[in-house]
Image: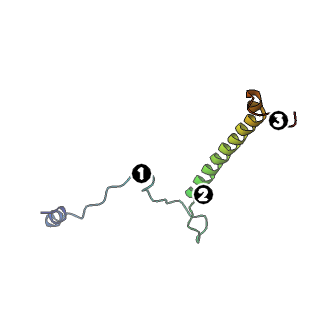
């Protein structure tokens, strides 16, 4: 006898699915930014967070590149600066 039949015979209600605790499976209940735009407040906040982190990574990479071109490369003898 299957679980559903056994519960029906015993007069029990159907079994409820187990609630998931994973972030990806959880429904986003935050309010939408605009009624016609399928973008919620949590998604907008997450986008701002990720783009800010990406901007700082890009700035750091640019500074590292500049230091390499301006100071590390000439000091190591990899190339010579044309202005000096």
- Above or below, comparing residue 18 to residue 67 in the picture: below
Give the Cα separation between the discs numbered 3 and 2.
Answer: 45 Å
Report crowding for label 1: few under 14, some 14 to 19, many 20 or more residues within 10 A (C-alpha): few
| Location of residue 21 in the rendering, given as x and y in whole percent from the top left corner | 40, 51
Asked if the residue at tag 3 contacts the one at tag 1, i.e. Cβ–Cβ closer than 8 Å, the answer is no
Q: What element carries label 3?
A: loop
How does the figure colour the protein chain or chains? rainbow
Q: Which mark is residue 81?
A: 3
| Location of residue 39 in the rendering, given as x and y in whole percent from the top left corner | 57, 63
Residue 7, by quadrant, is bottom left
The residue labelled by disc 1 is 22
- Of all residues, the one furthest to the bottom in this rendering is 36
Mark nearer the N terminus (2 vs 1): 1
Mark nearer the N terminus (1 vs 3): 1
Q: Please name the residue shown 60% across and 64% down the image.
A: 33
Q: Please name the residue shown 77% across and 34% down the image.
A: 79
């Amino acid at each position: 006898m299957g679980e559903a039949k056994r519960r029906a015979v015993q007069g029990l209600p159907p079994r409820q699915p187990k609630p998931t605790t994973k972030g990806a499976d959880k429904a986003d209940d935050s309010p939408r930014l605009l009624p016609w735009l399928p973008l919620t407040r949590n998604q907008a906040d997450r986008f701002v967070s990720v783009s800010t982190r990406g901007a700082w990574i890009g700035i750091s990479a640019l500074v590292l590149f500049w230091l390499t071109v301006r100071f590390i490369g000439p000091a190591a003898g990899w190339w010579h600066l044309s202005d000096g």
